[in-house]
Image: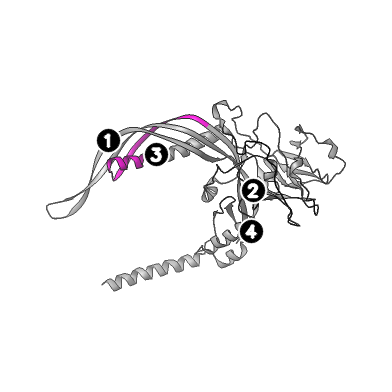
């Protein structure tokens, strides 16, 4: 994040709409309801994972978040009726935000929708209003606190046998930052037809008494139906899906209809991967699920030992989608000039990431393993 000089005389130029500035920058307004001041001490109140309300980090005062809308969870929308389908290529665009509390002017990446004012700590939730973008439909709020995430991380890294001791000591759990990442979820009814071969093993004995396994192959075909519920797809190109997959799954049905208060005090990112590409990625994931489930179906129905040459043709019906923000605790540290990132699922506490590997520890483990094998064969003689 880049910060410009504070100017308390420019607060009155804020509007609810976007307007272009020079050098590829645009200005946005911030949401007043997210910059709640504690009635006891005047500190800025953040969303609290422990109570699902607002909490003052200075004096501990809590306040409930008012919910007036009868719809408490994100509404599922019809994909066929969606008008905004394409990716949002923000490039190097920046946006200027003027703090409602102190008047400081800050510059953020265009993808950010929330952060804290670097001058006074006020919460900045800046929702752009544009015809070409969608607002979040819901939030899977943080349920795991920063302290719980740190505790889970410590247990996780201590369990890494090959991680050097020095690396474990440098990986400080208090460095975690809470981030909301954008995801699409898709519901669809699938109807598939398939063809495949299944094989059954049998044992035969030749004239010399040697036994071997022979597989008899048979063709098969059929139909398969399955409803897919909330297939999640990362809607950001800034993060590694393989790393994030290590902390899945999320319970995406456990969401709250979007209110800016839910992201107060956390960094949030808006989507850059649009509905069209998101749905294409979802179909890839769904096709993999269907292939696995159809393979299992063939094995059960035919008491098969093997299945191959599977070909599946699937039609997708009644596709619904949601745009959700999902919670992640993110941390990283440098060890021997290399940066290692760690993440914790902010809903379940599951930890993922890569840890440094000690070549010496690996070599010792290999030698111990070889010694154990040698001892086993020696005692077996």
State the SS at label 3.
helix
What percent of the width, then of the height, locates residue 86? 59, 31
Q: Earlier in the sequence, mark 4 or mark 3?
A: 4
Q: Is residue 142 above or below residue 315?
A: below
Within-10-Å neighbours for mark 1: few <14, some 14–19, many 20+: few
- Give me the C-alpha separation between circle 2 and circle 1: 50 Å
- According to the image, label 3 marks what residue? 291
Residue 310 magenta-drawn?
Answer: yes
Labelled disc at residue 343:
none
**Mark 2 nearby-residue class (10 Å; few <14, some 14–19, many ≥20):** many
- Which residue is painted at 59% across and 34% down in the image? 75
- What's the colour scheme? one colour
Q: Which residue is mark 4?
A: 147
Q: In the image, what residue occupies the spot 55% across and 41% down?
A: 253
Q: Single out the mark in the foreground, 4 or 3.
A: 4
Mark nearer the viewer, 4 or 2: 4
**For marks 4 and 2 on the same chain, the one whose residue lies earlier in the sequence:** 4
311 sits left or right of 3 in the view: left
**Number of residue marks:** 4
Q: Are marks 1 and 3 in contact (CB under 8 Å)?
A: no
In the drawing, does residue 355 fall left or right of residue 287?
right
Residue shown at 41%/38% (left/top)?
290
**How many angstroms separate mark 4 from mark 1 (CA)?**
56 Å
Magenta range: 294-319
**Separation of marks 4 and 3 at Cα, in angstroms:** 41 Å
Query: Residue 198, image x and y in percent?
Result: 28, 40
Would you name the residue on which mark 1 appears?
Answer: 219
């Amino acid at each position: 994040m880049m910060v410009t000089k504070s100017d308390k005389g420019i607060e009155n130029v804020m509007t609810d709409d976007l307007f272009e500035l020079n050098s590829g920058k645009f200005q946005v307004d911030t949401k007043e309801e997210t910059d709640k001041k504690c009635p006891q001490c005047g500190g800025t109140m953040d969303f609290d994972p422990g109570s699902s309300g607002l909490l003052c980090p200075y004096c501990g005062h809590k306040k409930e978040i008012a919910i007036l809308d009868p719809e408490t969870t994100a509404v599922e929308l019809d994909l066929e009726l969606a008008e905004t389908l394409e990716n949002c290529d923000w490039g190097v665009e920046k946006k200027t935000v003027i703090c409602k509390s102190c008047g400081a002017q800050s510059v953020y990446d265009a993808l950010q929708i929330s952060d804290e004012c670097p001058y006074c700590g006020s919460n900045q939730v800046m929702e752009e209003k544009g015809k070409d973008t969608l607002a979040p439909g819901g939030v899977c709020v943080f349920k795991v606190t920063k302290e719980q995430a740190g505790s889970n991380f410590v247990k996780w890294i201590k369990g890494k046998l090959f991680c050097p001791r020095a690396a474990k000591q440098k990986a400080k759990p208090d460095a975690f930052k809470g981030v909301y990442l954008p995801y699409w979820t898709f519901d669809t009814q699938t109807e598939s037809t398939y063809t495949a071969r299944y094989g059954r093993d049998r044992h035969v004995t030749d004239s010399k008494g040697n036994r071997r396994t022979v597989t008899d192959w048979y063709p098969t075909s059929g139909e398969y139906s399955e409803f897919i519920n909330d297939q999640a797809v990362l809607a950001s190109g800034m993060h590694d899906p393989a790393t994030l997959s290590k902390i899945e799954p999320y319970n995406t049905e456990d969401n709250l209809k979007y209110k800016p208060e839910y992201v107060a005090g956390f960094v949030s990112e808006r989507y850059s991967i649009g509905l069209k590409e998101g749905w294409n990625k979802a179909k890839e994931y769904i096709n993999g699920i269907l292939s696995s489930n159809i393979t299992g179906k063939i094995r059960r129905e035919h008491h098969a030992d093997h299945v191959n040459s599977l070909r599946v043709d699937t039609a997708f019906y009644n596709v619904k989608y949601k745009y959700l923000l999902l919670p992640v605790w993110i941390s990283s540290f440098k060890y021997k000039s290399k940066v290692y990132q760690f993440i914790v699922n902010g809903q379940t506490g599951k930890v993922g990431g890569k840890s440094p590997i000690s070549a010496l520890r690996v070599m010792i483990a290999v030698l111990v393993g070889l010694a154990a094998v040698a001892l086993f064969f020696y005692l077996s003689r």
